[in-house]
């Protein structure tokens, strides 16, 4: 009987151990399930946050596109007012010719017309400017006519500095620094603009 009691005691303890193992297994499975649930929940929250950011971004896309188009239009307008060419030397020559034409049509006599030296660092910039220094003679009416033509010109010039001094009779000696703006073109841009 003792042996039977021992066997039953062993069975009870085995059953208790098995029951305990099953309970621990169920608790572990429950813990894993809860961790998966929270993992999915966090994933859903992050996706909802991304979705709300996307909705905010796309809500303003029409205004962003409109603003981008305005900026592109302004860029085209400004580019159309700039001198263009393949090199700085070519552009400088074109500026000098244009200024000479304006001076001649206004009745001013240029004594000197030369570009100021510029550092080599600006040589490679696509957009830059060139300052042209001029020394002129003429009367005040001719100078006013020159200014009027300069500011109605289809090119972007800015008067950096000027000095007017009396010369002979009603004539004036005018020292003028004009800044002209330019855009360097590449070979592919030139080909595209030609077609």
Image: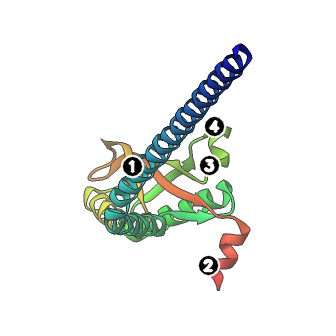
Q: What residue is at 65 percent from the left and 38 percent from the top?
A: 121
Viewer-side label of 1, 4? 1
Residue for badge 3: 125
Q: Is residue 23 above or below residue 73?
A: above
Secondary element type, mark 1: helix
> With 127 as the anchor, is 161 left or right in this view?
left
Asked whether 116 or 139 is in front, the reply is 116
Q: CA distance from mark 3 to mark 1?
A: 43 Å
Asked whether 103 or 78 is in front, the reply is 78
Instruction: Count all numbered tags in the image, as a single digit.
Output: 4
Residue for badge 1: 49
The picture places residue 139, in percent across and down from the top left corner, at: 30, 57
Q: Is residue 56 above or below residue 18?
A: below
Secondary element type, mark 2: helix
Secondary element type, mark 4: loop
Q: What residue is at 66 percent from the left and 61 percent from the top?
A: 90
N-terminal-most mark, 1 or 4: 1
The picture places residue 161, in percent across and down from the top left corner, at: 37, 41
Viewer-side label of 3, 1? 1
- Using a 10 Å C-alpha cutoff, classify the residue at mark 1 as few (fewer than 14 neighbours), some (14 to 19) or many (20 or more): few
Residue for badge 4: 119
> With 51 as the anchor, is 115 left or right in this view?
right
Q: CA distance from mark 4 to mark 3?
A: 11 Å
């Amino acid at each position: 009987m003792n042996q039977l009691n021992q066997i039953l005691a062993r069975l009870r303890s085995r059953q208790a151990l098995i029951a305990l193992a099953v309970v621990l297994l169920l608790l572990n499975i429950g813990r894993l399930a809860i961790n998966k649930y929270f993992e999915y929940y966090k994933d859903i929250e992050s996706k909802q946050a991304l979705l709300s950011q996307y909705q905010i971004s796309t809500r303003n896309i029409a205004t962003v596109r409109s603003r981008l188009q305005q900026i592109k239009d302004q860029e085209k307008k400004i580019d159309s007012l700039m001198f263009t060419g393949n090199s700085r030397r070519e552009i400088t020559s074109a500026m000098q010719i244009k200024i000479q034409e304006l001076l001649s049509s206004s009745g001013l006599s240029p004594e000197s017309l030369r570009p100021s030296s510029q550092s080599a660092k600006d040589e490679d910039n696509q957009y830059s400017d060139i300052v042209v220094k001029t020394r002129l003679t003429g009367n005040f009416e001719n100078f006013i006519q020159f200014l009027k033509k300069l500011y109605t010109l289809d090119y972007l010039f800015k008067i950096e500095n000027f000095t007017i001094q009396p010369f002979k009779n009603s004539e004036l000696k005018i020292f003028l620094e004009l800044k002209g703006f330019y855009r360097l073109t590449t070979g592919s841009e030139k080909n595209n603009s030609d077609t």
